[in-house]
Image (tube, coloured by chain):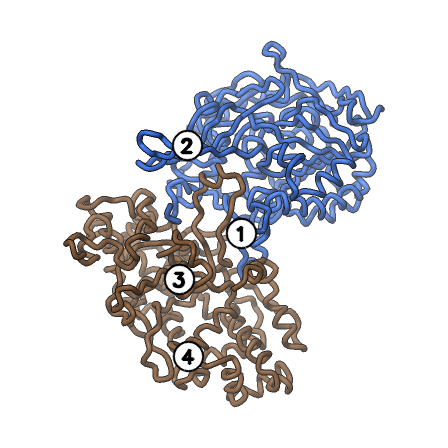
Chain colours: A blue, B brown
Amino acid sequence: MPHSRCIWNYSRRRPHRLGVRAPRALAHLVIALLATFTASGQQANGEITTAAAKIRHVFVIMLENKNFNDTFETSTQDPYLRKKLVPMGALLSEYYGIGHVSLDNYIAMISGQAPTPDTANDCVTATGTLYADVQQTGVASNGQVVAASGCIYSRETRTLADQLDSAGYTWKGYMEDMGNDPARESSACGHPLVGGLDNTQTAQAPSAAVPAGDAYATRHNPFMYFHGIIDSPNCAKRVVRLEQLTADLRDTGTTPNFALITPNLCHDAHDGAGTGAEGTLCANGDPGGLTSADKFLRDWVPKIVASPAYRKDGLLIITFDESASAVDRAVDAQTGKVILNFTFAGKTCCHQQPGPNIDGARPGTVVLSDTPKQQVRWVFDGYGGDRIGAVLLSPFIKPGTQSNTPYNHYSLLRSLEDIFRLDGYLGYAGNDPANGYILHTLGNDQAIFRTR
Amino acid sequence: MTRSSVRVRRSGRAVGATACVAAALIASAPCLPGDLSTGRPPGKPPSALAELGKHLFFDASLSASGRQSCATCHSPEFAYAPPNGRGVQLGGPSVDREGARAVPSLRYTLNRTPVWHREFVANPAERYREGEAPPTGGFGWDGRFDSLHEQAAFPLLAQNEMANTSPEDIASKLVHASYASEIRALIGRSAFADSSRLYAVALLAIERFELEDTSFHPFTSKYDDYLDGKTELSKQEARGLRLFDDTARGNCASCHPDDKGADGSHPLFTDYELEALGVPRNPEIRANAAPEYFDMGLCGPIRTDQASQTGYCGLFKTPTLRNVATRRAFFHNGRFHTLKDVLRFYATRDTDPATWYPASASGAVDLFDDLPTALRDNVDRREPPFTLHEHAAPLWSDDEIEDVLAFLKTLTDRDVVGLNP
């Protein structure tokens, strides 16, 4: 295959410039207001039956694209995570992503919103990798935004950040590499121009002007997909460079109650094979894969668990957005044509619902390219994000424990809403008993948390 | 080149540490400061090392002929590009040997050129979706140098360029340079006793001059004024810009980005990616008289570490288009001598290939004739403007070509605007 600006490499293609559409924007406002009043129909009960009730500082480190079996059973690249951190804390063996590919998982975690056609594909569209507004057409059950396209939710789509603000808690996003190259994105609240091309899809290698390179990816920073956050003057104070975390950890008063930590594209295992082999490296020359993710954890977990806030009432969650895909290659006996399938099992837990926006796409098959010699397809056998696992560390955890209770990113949101006793459950963090959709909440998992 | 050396060169810390490498060589110097992000004046005078580099850059005594300096081919009066229209420049002890490739301008890109790399996305599905990412970055048409001080050594030692015989040869010339006292002041009297150290400092000094001197980044074109709201484009220039941006047709900006950065910085009109355009063979180059000789860029023969990657053959780095209208030799092999011909090539490469490529023995058009036949599938035919078929309408009409040309002339800096045809 020629190493050209490949037909599928939408990230390098320019979008058509989008104009302001005032009438449509007004319609969105009305629809979104409806969403506001339907999204929080249930009140968080906040009844935590374990010592987790004392948690007031939660740190989440998000890694990328690894199967549970790889991370916790077979890989030799993550000894710190497997052999040091797992014995220190609790392993959630049945933790699932909610979709493929990345962005929908991050968004679910802070809003309970299910994928849109575009968030399910990292905003890669037929006209380019667009950082564009959700084109909302209605509201479905559980406060789900019905969307024809787009990735940025209106101001009225609430998030965990809104809930924490309302309850008087603090939150921050710590983004590695954000603003390394100020020409690529701002160092605070960094995102592309709304309606424009997202040029953070691929990592930028080091140069004289940007010695460390820039591997920040907007799509791994969920806060950037909500106008309620990015339009706020506080955004620049809340979504900051990772380096700020060191200072914020020094005192309980400066440590946010909720901290989402996103490593760069190399340190979150998205890039690189982790072997160090030439041709499989990150843009900055590091090995990537679980090797670089493990190093990131070695660098940052000790700082977090040594912080006053963590020691007082902290919980650290290390998990992944989704699992990896499998590859199979078949040859048509009659034509000799190669069929290359990248298959996502798409398994779910917890009676997860697909949401209103991905009918026909999940499950489904997407033909990426089709020539007389080869057809390449993405095959989604389901709509989930598959089994990824999670590790929890906390003074309130029983070290070396394991829970086989099923959880997913919606469960995590629900768990945070319970821990902080927030004002209702957002989106699919809320149960839907009529459809058998009942989530567990982490704080009540007696297999891993100490008693109160 | 060993694998381990590649890894060291490609680490971000190695790039960032350049100034501190200099400090290690120059006992009295701290790690050098400087705003290298845009090349705009940092409000500080150049470092002493950069001042030394300026002497070196313009010193013809550092060539075997005594007649060529870096500035001979990278002339400041020509936006650090050649002052003539030769497809490739002459060099060597008698200044009669041809270089291998056209000489690029040094303006704008040096401080932002990323190290050579090819991002590897771990998940195979995403890796495919995000494209078999093209190799990107590095200095030179084939991206083989990750730093400017490495690059600087090449023309100094190449026998068809400045033709010094060894680093020691260069160091011995520095002992007698008119600016020897400045070298002594910078690195001490003992520097002349250690030729390898002296040579290393010289390379770093050239690098610092190229990174720090504001003449490499003037941002004084009409397009810069347009981006700053100080002027308007003419109707023809604006039409040209629209054609340049049109993703369905020219799609020029996909490789030559023309938007402001997130911080308002002005675009440099290159994405630094390596690309196979299928530029026709240039019969003006003497080496091309040998039918078995092919300059295949990333896979060799000059670059050697990627020789086994046949998919890389024919790929050359995308140059900046700033000051492109002042050039008189285009593409890696200098095949074209007018910008209008370049645009005509883009417009009709696929619709009328017989215009650009010779007939083969069978009488058919010998398409992409500057690559071995087996490697011609590497040439980009997948994205606009390279998706047209033979006998289809050309990408642009003659009038549209004039419009794009008018836009490209707005990229010329004020100090060289007189070079516009």
Q: Amino acid at mark 2?
A: Ala
Say if residue A237 shows up in the picture.
Answer: no
Asked if disc 3 and disc 1 are in contact, CB closer than 8 Å, the reply is no
Q: Secondary structure at mark 1?
A: loop
On residue A330, the disc is 2
Q: Nearer the viewer, mark 4 or mark 2?
A: 2
User: Residue at the location (48% across, 43% down)?
Assistant: A198
Q: Nearer the viewer, mark 3 or mark 4?
A: 3
Question: B249 left or right of A250?
Answer: left
Name the foreground residue: A421 vs B143: B143
Name the foreground residue: A439 vs B378: B378
On residue A283, the disc is 1
Q: Which residue is mark 3?
A: B300
- Give how far apart the Cα atoms at labels 2 and 3 are: 34 Å
On residue B162, the disc is 4
**Chain under callout 4:** B
On residue A406, the disc is none
**Chain under callout 2:** A
Q: Nearer the viewer, mark 2 or mark 1?
A: 2
Asked if disc 4 and disc 2 are in contact, CB closer than 8 Å, the reply is no
* Marks 3 and 4 share the same chain: yes
Q: Secondary structure at mark 2?
A: strand
